[in-house]
Amino acid sequence: MKSVLAGILYNVNLVSFAGYRYLKLKNSLMAKRKKETKADSEELSQVIVKGMQEKKASDIVVLDLRKVKNAVADFFVICSGNSDKQLDAIADSIDDEVYKTLKENPWHSEGKNNKEWMLLDYITVVAHVFKKDRRTAFALEKLWGDAEITEIED
C-alpha cells in the first residue's frame, strides 16, 4: 500500500512540476514576445475574431486578462461551433487569418484530434474553439470572471 501511495504522490509531483515548468516557460515567452512582436495582443485578438467570423463561429467573446493577476495570456478569444467539421474550419481559418495578416504561427495548439475543445496559443492571446456542449461544461468565462468580457455580435 505504501508503494502505491508513494507512486501516486510521485506522479502528482511530476504533473505539478511539469505544469510549473510549462507556466514558467510560457511567462518567459510572453515577456520575450511583447518585446519582439510586430503585432500587439489587442490587434492579434481582433484578427483571431475575424478568423472565427469567417467560418460562422457563434457566441464569440473576448476576455481581456491584462488586469487579472497571474493570467496566462493577455486575451482569451472564445467561440463555439456546431460540428467537428466546423471546429476544424474555424481553427484553420484562425491560423490562416493570423498568418496572412500578421505572419505569425501558433506557439502551441491542442485538440485537433478530439474535436471538442481546440486551442491555438499565440502566447499573448489564446483562441479557444469549443463544441457548444463542451463550452458550457468548462465555463471559461466564469472561471476568469475578473476579466473584462466583450461579446462580439454575430
Image: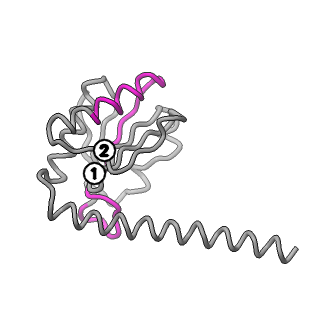
Residue visible at 35% across and 61% down? 72
Towards the viewer: 119 or 151: 119
Which residue type does callout 2 highlight? Answer: Val
Name the residue tied to disc 2: 77
Q: Is residue 58 visible?
A: no
Question: In the rendered image, which quarter is residue 1 located in?
Answer: bottom right
- Residue 15 x %, y %: 58, 66
- Residue 76 x %, y %: 31, 49
- Residue 152 x %, y %: 24, 36
Question: In the rendered image, which quarter is residue 146 located in?
Answer: bottom left
Towards the viewer: 145 or 69: 69
Which residue type does callout 1 highlight? Answer: Val
Residue 93 is one of the magenta-drawn residues = yes
Q: Is residue 51 above or below residue 1?
A: above
Q: Is residue 152 above or below residue 31?
A: above
SS of the residue at dot 1?
strand
Name the residue tied to disc 1: 125
Residue visible at 34% across and 29% down? 90
SS of the residue at dot 2?
strand
- Residue 89 x %, y %: 36, 25
Residue visible at 41% across and 28% down? 88
Towards the viewer: 123 or 81: 123
Q: Which region is colored magenta?
A: 66-95
Earlier residue among tags 1 and 2:
2
Please report contact status of discs 1 and 2: CB closer than 8 Å, yes or no: yes
**Label drawn at residue 85:** none
